[in-house]
Image (spheres, grey):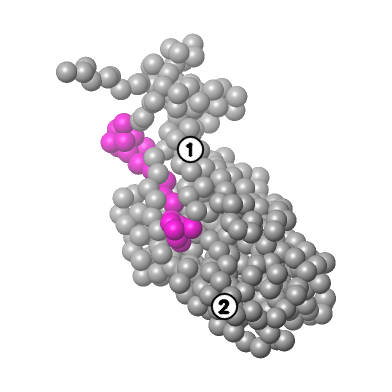
Amino acid sequence: MPVAREPVTQRDVAASLGVSISAVSLALSGRPGVGDDLRRRILDRAAELGYRPNASAVALRTSRTRVLGLLIRNLRNPHFLDVIDGFDETCARAGYEVMVGSSRYDPTREAQLVDAFQHRAIDGLAIAPIGTNHQVRERFSATGRPVVLLDTAAPDRATMSVRSDQEASVDLAVQHLLDLGHRRLAMVVAPDDKSPDPERLQHFRRLAADLGFTADTVTTELSADAARTAVREALERDPATRPTAFITNSDYIAHTVYLAAADLGLSIPEDISVIGHDDLPTSATLCPALTTIAVDRRGIGEQAATLLIDALAGSPAAQTNIVVPVELRVRASTARPAGGLRR
């Protein structure tokens, strides 16, 4: 029978680095009193040794559980898997555990999960909310514990947030399509009550007014089946008026444009062009490879976790509304418009 391994203690971490136990305790608890370099060394060594704080003891001593919550919208979208990965690894280095929930675009479920997180007395919450009604976020904030919004603009400067540069993503996609000669563009968006980033559509319409192209909107629930149906309906219109290019808010939804086009015997990019958002690893392997807006998905999770951990340590970041830069990755799903419905 294998011998049970003794848990790694703060004393073990201190001995391995030749530092005091008090320094280790300060670093692992997120309290001031140690320099940034030493704190980083202690956190890295604790992670290497597999140190895990005694949750019950920590909670009794500090009124904290050393647990952070992460509530996302859709586990089927691989974008959020990378966000979770970055969030979890950053938390682990700082000695925090992570609870993850998925609202599945259901406001009732979202509220239930936040209540469950509160019941477990988590120390802080990162949430990719449904829509821009932040009542759920405000209810958690009322407990005095920090909250970070993901993939949506903060309602005020006091609310922490991490999101990709929405206006830049629209600028890059639109300009690329206009350079190719497209003049009838469509943006695939969620219904108003579920859209976390309405500024994307607002900016799209402003660009249409300024640059003189036709801005169409395909409104759909953000599931694969619903988006496929909505895009197919847009493509069934008269070829003289239907969109020649689609801009989506995720690569996950962009692939449904491929499916809708195939349903109607249309080819990408010969008949329609498609631009996604996220640059998932699988996007380059689609046929044709997907032109997309790349964003550091893992970095979004890392920065969200860092904001929460710093806030709990009493050392808030200088920048609490972080906008992550984006980049256009041109591949084979975009080309000059040709037109014509081939059945």
Q: Position of residue 289 (x, y in %)?
A: 64, 56
Query: Residue, x 61% and y 67% (percent of image)?
Result: 248
Query: Residue, x 59% and y 45% (percent of image)?
Result: 299
Query: Residue, x 56% and y 45% (percent of image)?
Result: 298
Q: Position of residue 128 (x, y in %)?
A: 50, 59
Q: How many marks?
A: 2
Q: Position of residue 321 (x, y in %)?
A: 63, 54
Residue 72 colored magenta?
A: yes
Instruction: Give yes or no for contact between labels 2 and 1 (Cβ–Cβ under 8 Å).
Output: no
Amino acid type, mark 1: Glu
State the extent of the magenta-drawn residues as a range.
54-77
Q: Is residue 59 left or right of residue 171?
A: left
Residue 230 colored magenta?
A: no
Q: Position of residue 223 (x, y in %)?
A: 46, 69
Secondary structure beneath label 2: loop
On screen, 203 above or below 121?
below
Depth check, mark 2 against mark 1: the one in front is 2
Query: Residue, x 43% and y 12% (percent of image)?
Result: 15
On screen, 208 above or below 118?
below
In three-dimensional space, the C-alpha distance between marks 2 and 1, rounded to whole angstroms, equals 44 Å
Work out whether residue 66 can be spotted.
Answer: yes
Q: Is residue 155 left or right of residue 62?
A: right
Label 1 crowd (10 A; few <14 / some 14-19 / many >=20): some
On screen, 48 above or below 69?
above
Amino acid type, mark 2: Leu
Secondary structure beneath label 1: helix
Q: Which mark is residue 264?
A: 2
Quick one: quadrant of the C terminus? bottom right
On screen, 297 above or below 171?
above
Question: Closer to the camera, 274 or 332?
Answer: 332
